[in-house]
Amino acid sequence: MVLLKKGFAILAASFLAIGLAACSSSKNPASSDGKKVLTVSVEETYKEYIESIKTKFEKENDVTVKIVEKQMFEQLEALPLDGPAGNAPDVMLAAYDRIGGLGQQGHLLDIKPSNTKSFGDKEMQQVTVDGKVYGMPLVIETLILYYNKDLLKTAPKTFKDLEKLTEDPRFAFASEKGKSTGFLAKWTDFYMSYGLLAGYGGYVFGKNGTDSGDIGLNNKGAVEAVKYAEKWFETYWPKGMQDNSSADDFIQQMFLEGKAAAIIGGPWSAANYKEAKLNYGAAPIPTLPNGEEYAPFAGGKGWVASKYTKEPELAEKWLEYAANDANAYAFYEDTNEVPANTAARKKADEQKNELTSAVIKQYETATPTPNIPEMAEVWTGAESLIFDAASGKKSTQTSANDAVNVIKENIKEKYVK
């Protein structure tokens, strides 16, 4: 804290300023009319939506809702310091994979929602840690297949269909003889390749993602999946696909230029394709060669409340209110982000939006991203798992074993007492 280094006088003044700060939700400020104030932190793009739903909440609870604009991850990073200082908002949005760590560290309010029937087990699992519920699900996300409708009449159904694209001269990569850009996926990125590993029987943590002592990224199925990925890197794809730093730019360029017929990506990419006037389609990722479904991470975001709020009852009411059937669907209408609320999701699916339907269908086979703090070590430990094997730097089994060993060592160092 910089102010602590500037002497006793400034230190005292800083404490006074914190105590008087009007934006300090943890100090339970009152509005000009004497009503309680609930601060809601969202990104600028969601402000209009919050404006549209807050009036009813204000009337029903005799409260003033104050909107604070801040990028979601910045807000979550700031919470451990802003909360104790009295400068954190009462409620905010949080990515599911951040909820577990913040909850276990004591920064989120654990709640007892009156109704969870509008959510499935998969949704509630992503806001629950150690039996405590730390939020209400709002949005679901997962990877899907994008394809160019000007190049393909229908979406590929199997990976065999994708392999056939490599034989199509339209997608031959001119700079490297025998290589193809017909289908591309950034499998050097663990987030992108996990669905392949999981489809073959690999897994991050045992016991539904809660047992960090049981890591299944080097089991028989995971190794088989890596071998299949090697086939693409060695036989079909240009060498540049091994470069994790530039592969995504290459994939996007090829797809936008009509040189890739199909790619794996997230729903957040659709806006770029629409802006580029690309005639794209969206579909579930094709069935794997072993006959199983691609099982990418299931993610998204939900509403959470700061542990430091002075209005815990109001905060919990907001979480349930903002995630209810009507407001979840209104959020979808405003943002096109697929609802976690099952009633709202069903209504969204009925709109026959291709992107929405693809996410909903793929989500059925998706695996919730573990939300325990140890997951942070997986992202770094597994980042070279595919690359080391695909580049020939290590054997398939050695690459998988080394990745798991790195993850285990980091977990032992940081979390095991």
Image (cartoon, rainbow, N blue to C red):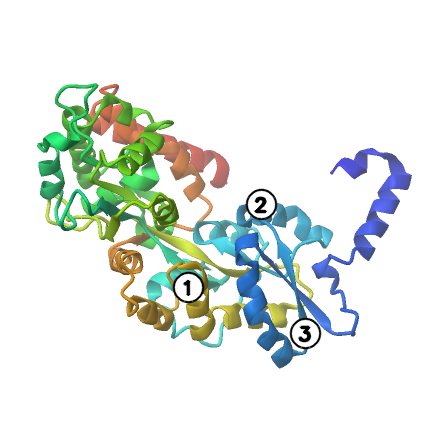
Q: CA distance from mark 3 to mark 1?
A: 26 Å
- Residue 88 % position (x, y): 66, 54
> Circles 3 and 1: CB distance less than 8 Å?
no
Q: Which residue is mark 3?
A: 63
User: What residue sits 53% from the left and 58% below the top?
Assistant: 46
Q: Relative to 166, is 107 above or below?
A: below
Among numbered discs 3 and 2, the one appearing first in the sequence: 3
Residues under labels 1 and 2: Cα distance? Answer: 23 Å
Q: In the shown orientation, is residue 359 left or right of residue 18?
A: left
Secondary structure beneath label 2: helix
Residue position marked by numbered label 2 in the rendering:
74
Q: Closer to the observer: label 3 or label 1? A: 1
Residue type (three-letter) at the residue carrying disc 1: Tyr
Residue 400 is situated, as x and y percent measured from the top left of the image, at 26, 31
Q: Residue at x 62, y 59 (%)?
A: 307
Kindly give the residue lying farthest to the bottom in the view shown. Answer: 60
Query: What quarter of the picture does the N terminus occupy?
Result: top right
Q: Mark 1 highlights which residue?
A: 332
| Residue 336 in picture, x, y percent from top left | 40, 59
Q: Is residue 207 visible?
A: no
Mark 1: which secondary structure?
helix
The residue closer to the viewer here, 54 or 243, is 54
Instruction: Pinpoint residue 387: horizontal percent, then vertical percent.
Output: 28, 27
In front: 260, or 391?
A: 260
Amino acid at dot 3: Val
